[in-house]
Image (tube, helix red, strand yellow):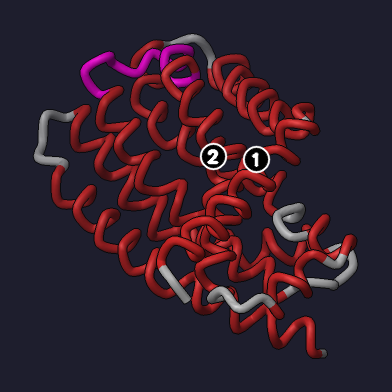
Amino acid sequence: MSRTSLAVACGAVLRRDLTLAWRSRGDIAMPVLYALIVATLFPFALGPEDALLQRIAGGVVLVTVLLAMLLALDAMFRSDIEDGSLEQLVLAPQPLALMLGMKILAHWLTTALPLIVIAPLLAGMLHLPVPVMGVLMLALLLATPMLSLLGAVLVALTAGTRRSGMLLALMLLPLCVPVVIFAAGAVAAAQQGLPWVAPIAWLGAALVLALVLAPLACAAALRIALDA
């Protein structure tokens, strides 16, 4: 198989998923609205004290983005299973892991990227200092693809299972703990004027590992789920 045909196939899968997502733009807006509402509730619940909100702003934004991403995770392969296109993808001559990687990329672009775009607004509502915004954005750019990759593996494991949304949340949230710890640790260190490169570097290393292994695990899990 030539590299040109493989690139064409990858582009076709990515373009198809982005087109389908654009046709249901309301689904893209739901996680964004959810994140805005959740972040708005914290000042009402904890009070308008700037020092307190500044201290928790990084963690609140990270957890809010994580929970908002969970809303759309269950639907990652749902339409493909229902219309049979996932079986065709499994039988296609192109490497399944690479094709699934394109679908995960489309999911990240339509779910996580809008959340990253509004993250400065969420952080501003919680009075996060402007110089720390860059570290928060960098942490989100590294953490959210990892959440999409881990979530894709779990979605593949539960493919075809009814009411898998709660099961996905129960399985994914423990896996997200290290991601949240390193991302929030980097933001907290930047707020205190301490070195924040180390936790960001750990996030980057974990993302590289997930980029290599998660599509392969996702492909294997899907084959098992569809054969069952």
Residue found 35% across the figure and 18% down from its top: 128
The quadrant where residue 29 appears: top right
Three-letter code, disc 1:
Leu
Q: Give the residue number, with chain letter if any, for mark 2.
A: 109
Residue 3 percent coordinates (x, y) = 41, 66
Quadrant occupied by the C terminus: bottom right
Mark sitting earlier along the chain (1/2): 1
Calculate the distance from the C-alpha at mark 1 to the C-alpha at mark 2. Answer: 8 Å
Q: Would you call the spot at circle 1 few (<14 residues within 10 Å), some (14-19), or many (20 or more)?
A: some
Residue found 71% across the figure and 44% down from its top: 71
Of residue 42 and residue 67, the one placed in the foreground of this image is: 67
Residue 129 percent coordinates (x, y) = 28, 15
Residue 9 percent coordinates (x, y) = 57, 60
Compared with 224, 37 (above or below) is above
Callouts 1 and 2 close, C-beta under 8 Å: yes
Of residue 91 and residue 20, the one placed in the foreground of this image is: 91
Which label is found at residue 74?
Answer: none
- For residue 51, side relative to residue 156 (left or right): left
Of residue 147 and residue 98, the one placed in the foreground of this image is: 98
**SS category of the residue bearing label 1:** helix
The quadrant where residue 177 appears: bottom left
Q: How many marks?
A: 2
Residue 15 percent coordinates (x, y) = 62, 44
The residues colored magenta run: 122-132
Chief SS of the magenta region: helix
Compared with 188, 214 (above or below) is below
**SS category of the residue bearing label 2:** helix
